[in-house]
């Protein structure tokens, strides 16, 4: 997918708005990992790439305070609109509807942060070369991305159910823009280095994600976001097949249910880097 196709795709993702609270709760440990690693100081200026519905912008804004500044940039009208309404009245937060790969940003950021917002560029090196133009010398990068697909049941569980219930999906090239484009750090580190970043390190971090609610609640999310949604669209699933997929997801989620919600292991690739001084 080109960046323009990504824009159309993400414009259509109203499910991220519908399930915003549940997704924010589920993905909070990844946001904490990114923000804590960045060790932001009051007064710093931060660029949040692919900020979606704005949870990360809000958390960063709280850390840098009113003497600091955070710009959330996102390509999706739908998601940035929600971010804008969430962040109304937070003077240090700015939301920008733009393609981070080509928007001309002034060189004023101390840090670039992202939770799951950098894996969708048609050319990662070009995108990061552009983003680097916005960063002060010595500025730091902290990027939370999915590690190996096979280690992430958030995707593998619904994908397996689609295969079992509907059939084999066409093979996906996970080096293309998509949630797993950054899974292989040996492929990504040279791209970030070519873009001008230095000290690029990727650390695999094992986390637990908790999808709030009952298995039935959580299954509503899994049929609207991710591989089950894609698979059912691909196979043009009938209502009956949709129901079967839903019930299969519920039965898998029951195995992971706790009083706090559905607990799933996740493996994250945490990339850190900086611009040369
Ligand atoms: C998986 S979502 C993550 C959203 C948010 N960071 C979060 O963790 O909730 C990926 C985000 O990247 C955005 N995105 C994709 N391509 C982009 C681009 N070229 N420039 C800016 N944002 C982009 C999408 O619109 C979407 O909001």
Image: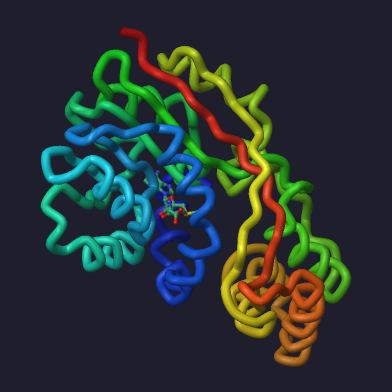
Left or right relative to 1: residue 226: right
Left or right relative to 202: residue 169: right
In the image, 204 versus 51, the foreground residue is: 204
Q: Measured from the top left, where is residue 231 in percent x and y?
A: 71, 68
Residue at image position (37%, 22%) is 129
In the image, 49 versus 104, the foreground residue is: 49
Residue at image position (60%, 68%) is 211
What number of labels is visible?
Answer: 0
Left or right relative to 165: residue 89: left
Residue at image position (55%, 63%) is 26
In the image, 128 versus 66, the foreground residue is: 66
Q: Measured from the top left, where is residue 35 in percent x and y?
A: 41, 41
- Looking at the figure, which quarter contains the C terminus? top left
Residue at image position (37%, 32%) is 39
As drawn, the residue found furthest toward the bottom would be 240
The correct choice, above or below, for 199 with respect to 263 in the image is: above
In the image, 94 versus 44, the foreground residue is: 44
Left or right relative to 142: residue 94: left
Quadrant of the rendered structure where residue 265 is? Answer: bottom right
Q: Measured from the top left, where is residue 176 in percent x and y?
A: 61, 40
Quadrant of the rendered structure where residue 137 is? Answer: top left
As drawn, the residue found furthest toward the top would be 277
User: How are the colours assigned in the image?
Assistant: rainbow
Q: Measured from the top left, where is residue 269 in percent x and y?
A: 61, 36
As drawn, the residue found furthest toward the right would be 164
The correct choice, above or below, for 217 with respect to 75 in the image is: below
Quadrant of the rendered structure where residue 225 is? Answer: bottom right
């Amino acid at each position: 997918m080109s960046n323009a196709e990504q824009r159309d795709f993400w414009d259509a993702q109203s499910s991220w708005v519908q399930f915003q609270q549940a997704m924010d709760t589920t993905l909070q440990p990844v946001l904490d990992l990114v923000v804590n690693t960045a060790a932001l100081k009051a007064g710093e200026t931060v660029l949040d790439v692919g900020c979606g519905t704005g949870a990360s912008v809000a958390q960063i804004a709280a850390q840098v305070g009113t003497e600091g500044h955070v710009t959330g940039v996102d390509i999706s009208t739908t998601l940035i609109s929600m971010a804008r309404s969430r962040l109304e009245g937070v003077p240090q937060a700015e939301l920008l509807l733009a393609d981070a790969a080509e928007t001309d940003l002034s060189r004023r950021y101390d840090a670039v942060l992202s939770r799951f917002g950098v894996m969708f560029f048609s050319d990662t090196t070009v995108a990061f070369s552009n983003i680097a133009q916005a960063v002060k010398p010595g500025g730091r990068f902290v990027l939370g991305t999915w590690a190996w697909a096979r280690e992430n049941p958030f995707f593998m569980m619904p994908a397996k159910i689609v295969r079992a219930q509907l059939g084999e999906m066409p093979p996906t090239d996970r080096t293309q823009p998509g949630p797993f484009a950054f899974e292989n750090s040996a492929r990504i580190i040279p791209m970030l280095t070519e873009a001008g970043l230095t000290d690029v390190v990727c650390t695999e971090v094992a986390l637990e994600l908790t999808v709030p609610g009952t298995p039935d609640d959580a299954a509503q999310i899994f049929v609207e976001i991710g591989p089950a949604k894609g698979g059912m669209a691909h196979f043009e699933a009938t209502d009956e097949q949709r129901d079967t997929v839903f019930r299969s997801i519920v039965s898998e989620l029951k195995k992971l249910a706790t009083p706090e919600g559905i607990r799933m292991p996740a493996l994250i690739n945490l990339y850190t880097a900086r611009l040369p001084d």
